Image: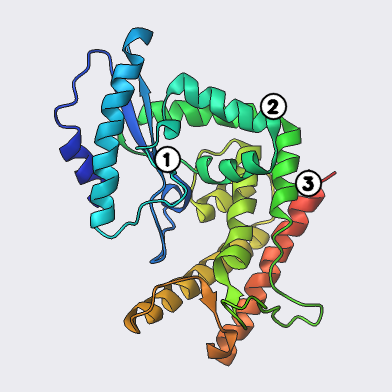
Amino acid sequence: HLTRRLIELETDELNFPGLRWCWIALGSEGRMEQTLATDQDNAFIFTVASDAERETVRSRLLEIALRINQGLDACGFPLCKGGIMASNPKWCLTEEEWRNQFSRWIDTGGPEELLNASIFFDFRPLYGEEMLALNLRTWLEGKVRANPRFLKQMAQNALRNAPPLGLVRDFVLSDDDAHPHTLDLKLNGTTPFVDGARILALASGQIATNTAQRLMMSGRDLHIPEDEIKGWVQAFHFIQLLRLRNQHDQQRKGMAPDNFLDPDRLSVLDRRILKEAFRQARKLQARLALDYER
């Protein structure tokens, strides 16, 4: 794995007594769902033997993280425009600082906090002492389950993003001048499944981060009918496949890959399957509304 090798090379001479650290992947990389249109989302968790060393260690980790982020950029993984990278002091935190940060987001539950949760709560350990990330995950699951109001807010936020189907079951296309007559396969396609799966995982205490795994494992724990879960997983995989296929076609034509697809380019069969996939997203959202909006 390219990222692991870069981290290995840059941290080879990192020896502070008592230092424990872990590089975590966030967002789509944390879910293992990156496409050809992607950037970096990563962070550092660390612990030190004494508070007196904390800022010295943080400065050293930030220097290393900057080289790793720049190395990944040189390898074709663009820097995050929003600065969600381990080289940003906001995201190079001790285990205690991460807990405090997550607690503030959960306790506040405003729009910005919910957006951050949708990125950071998909973290997974990529390199280093994985137990730091796994312990943080276990703590997070317990914190969220003890705050049903936050789950309700996450569900309300997720339901604002409806699948693009009209009343007569035809596609609702973008009227955006930049992408006219298209479907946003990320925002209105995969995101309803990603958001729904995250909520179900947090509600059931599942530590999986991958969307399909979350749906299957959390669905089982929450006693959701198996055929319902299977429909969601198949629909998510189909839309994700369309995203990758569309981006591959764009790259072959020398275009920058994105998530916008003109449905007129699809075969009759693919259009039919895509409509059914969007209906499955509606069904998942209907369950979220029933279980978490009351």
Earlier in the chain: of badge 1 and badge 3, it is 1
**Residue shown at 62% from the left, 32% from the top:** 105
Mark 1 and mark 3: Cα distance apart in space:
27 Å
Residue at screen point 23% across, 56% down: 74
Amino acid type of the residue tagged 1 in the rendering: Arg
Residue at image position (69%, 60%) is 161
Q: Which residue is mark 3?
A: 291
| Residue at image location 57% in from the left, 78% down from the top | 179
Q: Find the residue positioned furthest to the right.
A: 294
Q: Quadrant of the C terminus?
A: top right
Q: Percent from the top left, x then y, of residue 94?
A: 41, 22
Q: Is residue 143 left or right of residue 21?
A: right
Residues at marks 1 and 2 touching, judged by CB atoms closer than 8 Å = no
Q: CA distance from mark 1 to mark 2?
A: 22 Å
Q: Amino acid at mark 2?
A: Ala
Where is residue 165 shown, x and y percent of the image?
72, 75
Residue annotated with mark 2: 146
Looking at this view, is 275 or 80 the one in front? 80
Task: Inspect this view and state whether residue 285 appears.
Answer: yes
Where 244 sits versus 55, above or below?
Answer: below
**Camera-side mark, 1 or 3:** 1
Q: Decide: few, some or many residues near mark 2? Use Cα within 10 Å; few <14, some 14-19, many ≥20.
A: few
| Residue type, label 3 | Asp
Label annotation for residue 13: none
Crowd band around label 1 with a 10 angstrom C-alpha radius: few (<14), some (14–19), many (20+):
many
For disc 1, the marked residue is 124
The picture places residue 99, in percent across and down from the top left corner, at 53, 24
**Label 1 SS:** strand
User: Which one is in front, 246 or 208?
Assistant: 246
Q: Residues within 10 Å of mark 3 (few under 14, many from 20)?
A: few
